[in-house]
Image (tube, rainbow, N blue to C red):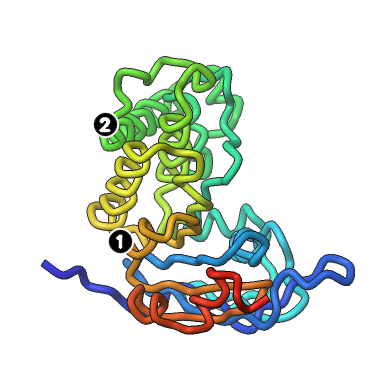
Amino acid sequence: MAKKIGDVILDVHNISLAFGGVKALTDISFNVKEHEIRAIIGPNGAGKSSMLNCINGVYTPQHGTISFRGKTFDHMNSREVAEMGVARTFQNLALFKGMSVLDNIMTGRNLRIKSNIFMQALRIGPAEREEIKQREFVEHIIDFLQIQPYRKTPVGQLPYGLQKRVDLGRALAMEPQVLLLDEPMAGMNVEEKQDMCRFVLDVNDEFGTTVVLIEHDMGVVMDISDRVVVLDYGKKIGDGTPDEVRNNPEVIKAYLGTSH
């Protein structure tokens, strides 16, 4: 059954970002529709991670706006973005290496915890009941990502591919409406990539989560994306379905290196 793509949930409009005199992004516009997998691709230095950093409030663009569910912002901070329902994984794993898989994923529930820190520390009354409820949610994610055997293992002892899965789990624990994935398959072998592709598709399908994905592996992008936006040197050079992008002369030039 074909999946139902909804209306625009995230609209990036004329975003420009510079560091000193160096332009990272120039006048970039594109949108993301509810329930789609939207890829952002481009050669190294194209501005892909900078774009994600603008969406999730890490960078403030000098020009342009970002709209989420029809509400427009020229700047948001990371916490506001998370509270609205946007979660992010990182290219370089930002996990707590000495903590268990379970505890790492539990950190993604912080925004959902209502009891105050004193009650949490003493684990009394409502705080204890709430922790049990949050743990149940986290156990569901652990089952979903098939990492049950490692739930008590310190993350630093896991192979890289599994650490990436824990990172995904922590983002899912926030129950995001939009999930930003920054190179979720970087550094993985073929088998690990296939697993991660399956999880991304399942997250999109079973949880209904909208996914925005940066990825270097063109095969992966073409296989799992609904639409693709292409950046090169901070400018948008292509936008459309995988087939449209694959046959776009400017995109072919950028990737084959003949334009520079």
The image quadrant where one finds the N terminus is bottom left
**Which of the 4 image quadrants contains residue 9?**
bottom left
Residue 188 relative to residue 231: left or right: left
The residue that appears at 36% across and 33% down in the rendered structure is: 138
Taking the view exactly as shown, the residue that stands out farthest to the front is 258
**Numbered disc 1: secondary structure:** helix
> Percent position (x, y) of residue 259?
63, 78
Q: Which residue is painted at 36% across and 37% down in the image?
A: 192
Residue 42 vertical position relative to residue 26 in the rendered view, above or below: above
Residue drawn 42% across the image and 60% down it: 218
Name the quarter where the C terminus is drawn.
Answer: bottom right
Three-letter code for the amino acid on which mark 1 is drawn: Asp
The answer for how far apart the CA atoms under marks 1 and 2 are is 25 Å
Given contact means CB atoms under 8 Å apart, are the residues at marks 1 and 2 in contact?
no
Q: Residues within 10 Å of mark 1 (few under 14, many from 20)?
A: few
| Mark earlier in primary sequence (1, 2) | 2
Q: Where is residue 258 in the image (x, y as percent from the top left)?
A: 60, 76
Q: Nearer the viewer, mark 1 or mark 2?
A: 1
Q: In the rendering, which numbered label is found on residue 182?
A: none
Query: Which residue corresponds to mark 1?
Result: 223
Q: Which residue in the rendered view is the most extreme toward the left?
A: 1
Q: Which amino acid does label 2 sit on?
A: Asp
Compared across the picture, whether 144 is left or right of 186 comes to left
Crowd class of label 2 (few under 14; some 14 to 19; many from 20; radius 10 Å): few
Query: Which of 188 and 73 lies nearest the eye of the viewer?
Result: 188
Q: Residue at label 2?
A: 143
